[in-house]
Amino acid sequence: MAVELNRRHVISLAGAAVAGTAFANLAHAAEPAPSGSVDPVKLAEPGKLKDMVYGEANAPVTIVEYASLTCPHCADFTLNTFPKLKEKYIDTGKVRLIFREFPFDPRAMAAFMLARCAPEERYFPMIDVFFKQQRDWALAEDGKEALLQIAKLAGFTQESFEACLTNQQLLDDVKETVERGSKEFGVNATPTFFINGKKYAGALSIDELSAIIDKLL
């Protein structure tokens, strides 16, 4: 997995082309069935990074999503399915969604680090921009420059951009999130969802999500 790198690698490899395997993630099944389950209490425990969350803490259904910013299926879910999920379930207090980083390549790692370096209220807006402009930066010849231009829109300077991508502690913390997801919860593809502890690997439509969630309410 391409997250085995140090801070010198991140800022240099952010400019490297993303390998085709970064785009070879799972598609959703017609009728989703859980591929396993984990202890929901253990799953809900935060790692070294503060969990980024939508929804109320006392919502009856908790979804934990592991995603990579260079994953097309993750982008499709965030841009097309999530708004419907938010309107129908999150905004009505029925669902809480925890979003966790699972980068498969250096560019995804760099983008996640930039989102973490931004003020907390800009985290999800940056994630949305990275997904909306995914092909512009993930497949750009000069990925570092493409990421810099997006970061500048979020208030970064050249100096703060460089400082973020050379932050060894932040890099280690994102790597820990990946390692924990892989070792403790069996995450090996993106997106992967855990709905009240049951694992669903691959993108889910709003109809598929509704079929799962409604039975839990």
Image: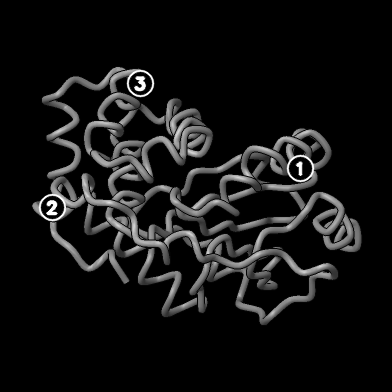
Q: Cα distance, mark 1 to mark 2? A: 36 Å
Q: Cα distance, mark 2 to mark 3? A: 22 Å
Identify residue for label 1.
85
Are the residues tagged 1 and 2 within 8 Å (C-beta)?
no
Residue pictured at 49% horizontal, 74% vertical:
188
> Residue 142: x percent and y percent?
23, 39
Q: Residues within 10 Å of mark 3 (few under 14, many from 20)?
A: some
Q: Earlier in the sequence, mark 2 or mark 3?
A: 2
Identify residue for label 3.
154
Q: For the C terminus, give its image quadrant.
A: bottom right
> Residue 160: x percent and y percent?
16, 27
Q: Which mark is residue 7?
A: 2
> Residue 153: x percent and y percent?
35, 18
Compare residues 92 and 170 and report the one nearer the observer.
Answer: 170
In terms of secondary structure, where does tag 2 sit? helix
Residue pictured at 69% horizontal, 80% vertical:
35
Q: Quadrant of residue 56?
A: top right
Amino acid at the residue labelled 1? Leu
Q: Quadrant of residue 47?
A: bottom left
Q: Earlier in the sequence, mark 3 or mark 1?
A: 1
Instruction: Give above or below for 155 relative to 196.
Output: above
Residue pictured at 32% horizontal, 72% vertical:
1
State left or right for residue 37 relative to residue 191. Answer: right
Q: Cα distance, mark 3 to mark 1? A: 26 Å
Amino acid at the residue labelled 2? Arg
Residue pictured at 79% horizontal, 33% vertical:
87
Amino acid at the residue labelled 3? Ala
